[in-house]
């Protein structure tokens, strides 16, 4: 059905184009005829002007009364050749009397002859207006000529070739018409082929019952089903692609959060390292202070032992008052010693507490480095575990040299 419609539309198209081309050819021929008539009128006017302005001054009264022969014919022929024929477009000039007799011609044999085919025409022109006609491929213009009003009248036949005028007027238009004719032939041929193809078109029922048509319809249905399945698969792929993009965005967000947490953890680790460094320095300073206190305690203990020995010696030699005074001094020294021992115990407990904090901090740092998969920096001498070595006497213990 669709093929029939297309063929019908093509047939109408080719028929319309053929009609348009025919009309164009007719317009071209009319334009050529109009141009030829216009150029013909222009040539007639030029011939009439040449007869009235150039030929008339060459004639005298004797030329109008009788035939021109002999020397006068040669003189007049030379003048016509020089002033009229040589400048164109007039190729020859003949002069008729009012009755149609030839008064002058370049061929002397036709002078005084009365051509019957122009007798009535010459008489009508002598008493009327100029007339032109085409004869034998020449444009002949008959112009009345007189020397004075009321005087004798002759008719000048101004002859010029008509083929150049016709070719100039119709050459271009005829070429256009020829091209249009070829176009018309092509469109007419296509129109005939379209009509023949339309006549050969089978009935729609026969086409639908043809096995090839049924096969094409089945193939089309299968192709449509495959296209629908492909479209569904494409939509699923697009949905998966969108979900994958969402997961990628979520992973990027988690990576950014992890980077932020890592940066924060690194800051905490740096703070913890600074605290460990400070604790290590404090432990080292406390160890130095503890050693100094032990030295002072040992010095005090040695002094106390000397005092006790001196007291014992003095007891043997001195009176009771001095002995009592020395005993008080010894007791004061012992109390001072006990205070120093207590101070040492306090420092010892602080050292133990700081050591516990130090070890806990190192353990926390190791756990964080293990969680972050970061290797520990064992080559940094600043963070080596300080070795705190000290000893302190228990309360109530006595140093060597103490008395009973």
Image (cartoon, grey):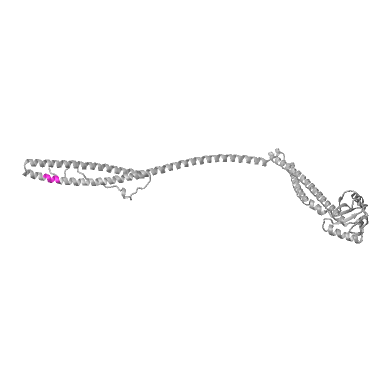
Q: Position of residue 246 (x, y in %)?
A: 48, 40
Residue 250 falls left or right of residue 155: left
| Residue 271, quarter of picture | top left
Residue at the location (16% across, 40% down)?
335
In this view of the protein, can residue 332 be seen by the observer? yes
Front residue of 156/383: it is: 156
Q: Position of residue 86 (x, y in %)?
A: 83, 59
Quadrant placement of the C terminus: top left
Residue at the location (33% across, 43% down)?
364
Quadrant placement of the N terminus: top right
Q: Farthest residue in the bottom direction?
A: 71
Q: Position of residue 14 (x, y in %)?
A: 74, 44
In this view of the protein, can residue 362 be seen by the observer? no
**What secondary structure predominates along the stretch shown in magenta?**
helix
Is residue 36 one of those drawn in magenta?
Answer: no
The segment highlighted magenta reads 303-308
Task: Count numbered badges in the picture.
Answer: 0
Q: Position of residue 306 (x, y in %)?
A: 12, 46
């Amino acid at each position: 059905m669709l093929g029939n419609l297309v063929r019908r539309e093509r047939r109408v198209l080719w028929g319309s184009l053929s009609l348009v081309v025919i009309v164009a050819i007719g317009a071209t021929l009319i334009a050529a005829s109009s141009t030829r008539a216009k150029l013909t009128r222009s040539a007639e006017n030029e011939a009439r002007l040449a007869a009235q302005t150039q030929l008339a001054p060459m004639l005298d009264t004797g030329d109008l009364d009788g035939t021109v022969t002999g020397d006068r014919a040669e003189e007049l022929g030379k003048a016509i050749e020089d002033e009229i024929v040589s400048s164109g477009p007039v190729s020859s000039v003949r002069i008729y009397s009012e009755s149609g007799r030839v008064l002058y011609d370049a061929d002397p044999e036709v002078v005084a002859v009365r051509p019957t085919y122009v007798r009535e025409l010459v008489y009508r022109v002598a008493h009327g207006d100029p007339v032109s006609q085409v004869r034998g491929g020449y444009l002949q213009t008959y112009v009345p000529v007189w020397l004075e009003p009321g005087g004798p009248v002759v008719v000048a036949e101004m002859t010029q070739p008509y083929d150049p005028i016709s070719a100039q007027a119709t050459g271009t238009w005829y070429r256009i018409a020829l091209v249009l004719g070829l176009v018309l032939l092509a469109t007419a041929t296509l129109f005939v082929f379209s009509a023949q193809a339309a006549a050969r078109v089978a009935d729609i029922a026969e086409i639908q019952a043809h096995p090839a048509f049924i096969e094409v319809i089945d193939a089309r249905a299968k192709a449509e089903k495959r296209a629908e399945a492909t479209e569904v698969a494409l939509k699923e792929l697009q949905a998966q692609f969108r979900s994958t993009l969402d997961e990628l965005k979520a992973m990027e967000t988690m990576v950014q959060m992890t980077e932020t947490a890592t940066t924060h953890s690194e800051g905490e680790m740096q703070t913890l390292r600074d605290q460990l460094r400070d604790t290590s320095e404090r432990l080292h300073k406390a160890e130095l202070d503890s050693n100094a206190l032990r030295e002072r305690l040992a010095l005090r203990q040695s002094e106390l032992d000397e005092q006790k020995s001196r007291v014992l010696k003095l007891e043997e030699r001195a009176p009771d008052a001095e002995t009592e005074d020395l005993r008080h001094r010894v007791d004061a020294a012992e109390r001072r010693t006990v205070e120093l021992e207590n101070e040492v115990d306090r420092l010892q407990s602080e050292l133990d507490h700081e050591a516990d904090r130090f070890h806990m901090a190192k353990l926390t740092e190791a756990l964080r480095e293990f969680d972050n998969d970061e290797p520990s920096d064992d080559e940094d001498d600043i963070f080596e575990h300080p070795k705190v070595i000290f000893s302190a006497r228990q309360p109530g213990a006595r140093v060597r040299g103490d008395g009973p």
